[in-house]
Image (cartoon, grey):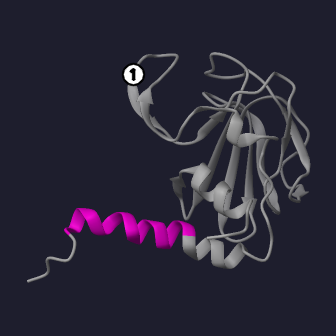
Amino acid sequence: MYTLLSKKNRILPVCFIFFIVFPYQRLKSQKMIPPVESYHKTVSSHYGYRKHPVDGVFKKHHGVDFSVPQGTAVFSTYYGIVLSSMYERGYGNTILIDNEGGFRTRYGHLMTLFVGKGELVKPGQLIGLSGNTGHSTGPHLHYEIIIEGKKINPLLFLNIMCNNSL
């Protein structure tokens, strides 16, 4: 009889190892750069379930929102190639980057896009300016990290990778 952890309680450790530890091991030789300065001080909406600020429906927020003034510099967090740089319903002006190491980053609600599809980017490169485009209640940056097709809590990954420690 297996009673160490219930099936439900085994999922979190496995997810942590698969989505955080493995990518971290691949990337640990390089630091990530936060998408905005003082990112930890500007979080206005966390990853997870919440009441949507526009439509009032309780649903999952797949990224983190950083409340910053319109026109704030937005930086690429890691090396990659721009998959798309365009207006997307909901996200507004959005950049999606396929990053080295098997993950993707999305930057939403931008006022200005400085990179185009197919461009190579590096950590700390200015890629856009924050804005209030798409389904938004005010200027901010919506930031997502996608690993193996799964959206994860960006703050967990940023806190580990920007400090380069696990």
Give the residue drawn at x 54%, y 37%.
46
Q: Quadrant of residue 137?
A: top right
Was residue 32 drawn as part of the magenta stretch in this picture?
no
Give the residue drawn at x 87%, y 45%.
116
Q: Main secondary structure of the magenta part?
A: helix
Q: Left of 118 or right of it: where is 46?
A: left
The residue most toward the left is: 1
Location of mark 1 (residue) = 57
Was residue 19 drawn as part of the magenta stretch in this picture?
yes
Q: Is residue 119 above or below residue 42?
A: below
Q: Quadrant of residue 111?
A: top right
Dot 1 alpha-carbon crowd within 10 angstroms: few under 14, some 14 to 19, many 20 or more: few
Give the residue drawn at x 82%, y 41%.
37
SS class, disc 1: loop
Residue 15 location (% of width, % of height): 43, 66
Residue 5 location (% of width, % of height): 22, 72
Q: Is residue 26 above or below residue 160?
A: below
Residue 43 location (% of width, % of height): 64, 34
Q: Left of 110 or right of it: where is 40?
A: left
Give the residue drawn at x 85%, y 55%.
118
Q: Quadrant of residue 79?
A: bottom right
Give the amino acid type for the residue marked by disc 1 in the picture: Val
* Front-lying residue, 93 or 123: 123
Question: What is the quadrant of the N terminus in the image?
Answer: bottom left
* Front-lying residue, 165 or 103: 165
Residue 10 location (% of width, % of height): 29, 69
Q: Which residues are magenta?
A: 6-20
* Front-lying residue, 74 or 92: 74
Question: What is the quadrant of the C terminus in the image?
Answer: bottom right
